Image (tube, helix red, strand yellow):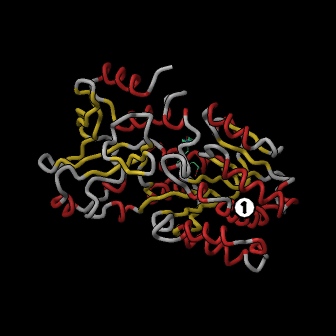
Amino acid sequence: MKMPTERIREEIGQTGTISFARFMELALYCPETGYYEKKKDNVGRQGDFITSVSVGSLFGELLAFQFAGWLDELKTRHEKLKIIEAGAHDGKLAADILNWLQANRPDLFSTIEYIILEPSPARQQWQEEKLRPFPNVRWCPSFTACRSPFTGILFSNELLDAFPVHRLGWDATRKQWFEWGVALEGEVFRWSRMPHPAACLPAVLLNLPAGLLEVLPDNYTIETSPAAEAWWREAAGVLAQGKLLAIDYGFTDDEMLSPARTQGTLRAYHRHHVTDDLLANPGEQDLTAHVNFSAIQKAGETAGLRTETFCTQPQFLTRILARAVPEKFFARMDAKQIRQFQTLTHPEHLGRAFRMLVQSR
Ligand SMILES: C[S@@+](CC[C@H](N)C(=O)[O-])C[C@H]1O[C@@H](n2cnc3c(N)ncnc32)[C@H](O)[C@@H]1O
C-alpha cells in the first residue's frame, strides 16, 4: 500500500516533471491512501471543510422537494425513475433525500431507484453502512456499468471541484501559455514548468482578445479541468430524459478572468484553514479549484442538453422554499432549520460562491 508521496516521487523519478493534474489525482485518489480514499470524516465540522450537506439535513430535504416536483413531471410517461448521485462521499446527502421522500412522498419513494455512481470500493462501503435502511439504493462504479440511458435526475454536490485540474501560466516574454508541473528538489516537491507549451488550451483562453494578452501579467495563472468537462459530457450521454444538476462553487469565463485574481483559484484545505503550500503533504490536505461553469454548460449543450437554470445557491433554494411553504413543507420547520437555511444562503457563509446549473433533455 503506497502513500501518495511515494507514488508521486516514483512518477517524477521516471519522467522528471509531472503535471499538477496528475499530482492532484494521486494526492486525492491514490487507492487506499489518497485524501478521499482513506478518510471519511474529512467533510464536516470535525474535518477539514464544511459543505452544504454537513450544515444539516435541510439542504437534502429542499433538494428532495425539488426532485419530487421534477419526477412528477416525468412520472406519467415512465415507470422506473432514477435519482443518480455522484460524489456521495459518506452517503449523508442520499440519506437526507431518501428520508424526506420516504416520510413525505411514499408514493415516489416506493417506485424510484436511487443509484450512487461510485468508482471507489472504500467509499461505497461507507455509503452502504449509512444507507442500509433503504432497500431501493444500488451502486454503479461508472457510467458504462449503468448500461442503459436513464430517465430521472443525475446530480452532484461539490463533485466537479474535486476533479484534477491543469494549472496554466502565461509567459509574457514568449507570449505563450505554459503548464505548471511538479518536480522534486531534494526531498521537497517544487513547482516546475512542463517542458512543452501548454497543449489543449481551454475556450476561455483561446477566445481572449489579443489586446488583453498584451497586458496580462507574467505568470498569470488559471486552471482548467478537462476531466470535469468529460465527466459532464458522459453524464449528458446517459440521460435519456430528465435533468442534470451540478451544485458547486465556481465562476463563468468572464469571472474566471478577473484582473484581481492573478494566481487562479486552486486551494488546499486542512482543518478549516486555507493552507499556502499546495504541494505539501499530498494525501493529508484537500486540493480543490473553482469550477468553470461556462465550460461545463457548453459541454452539456454540445451533448444536446438545454440549459434551464444557472443561478446562485441562495436563489435556487429560496425559489424551492417559496413553493414549499404553501405545500406545508414548513409545518415542522424549527429554529435549527432556519439557522441552516441562513448558513446555506448568507453571503458570509455558503451563499456567495455556490451556483446551481440545471440542464435537461
Ligand atoms: C468535496 S467531496 C463532496 C462530498 C459530498 N457530496 C458533500 O457535499 O458533502 C467530493 C467527493 O467526490 C468524490 N469523487 C471524486 N471523483 C469522483 C467520481 N469520478 N465519481 C464519484 N465520486 C467522485 C470524492 O471522493 C469525494 O467523496
The image quadrant that residue 25 belongs to is: top left
The quadrant where residue 11 appears: top left
| SS under mark 1 | helix
Could you tell me which residue is drawn at 56 percent across and 66 percent down? 344
Left or right of residue 177: residue 242:
right
Q: Position of residue 5 (x, y in %)?
A: 39, 27
Q: Which residue is mark 1?
A: 64
* 167 displayed left or right of 111: left
Task: Please state the horizontal and vertical placement of residue 191, each as a whole percent of the image.
Answer: 25, 37
At 29% from the left edge and 36% from the top edge, which residue is drawn? 181
* Whether residue 232 can be seen here: no
The quarter in which the C terminus is drawn is bottom right
| Other-residue count near label 1 (Cα within 10 Å), few / some / many at <14 / 14–19 / ≥20 | many
Return the residue nearer the eye: 203 or 49.
49
Name which residue lies at 78% across and 55% down: 99
Compared to 313, does 247 lie above or below?
Answer: above
- The percent position of residue 38, horizontal first and vertical second, equals 55, 32
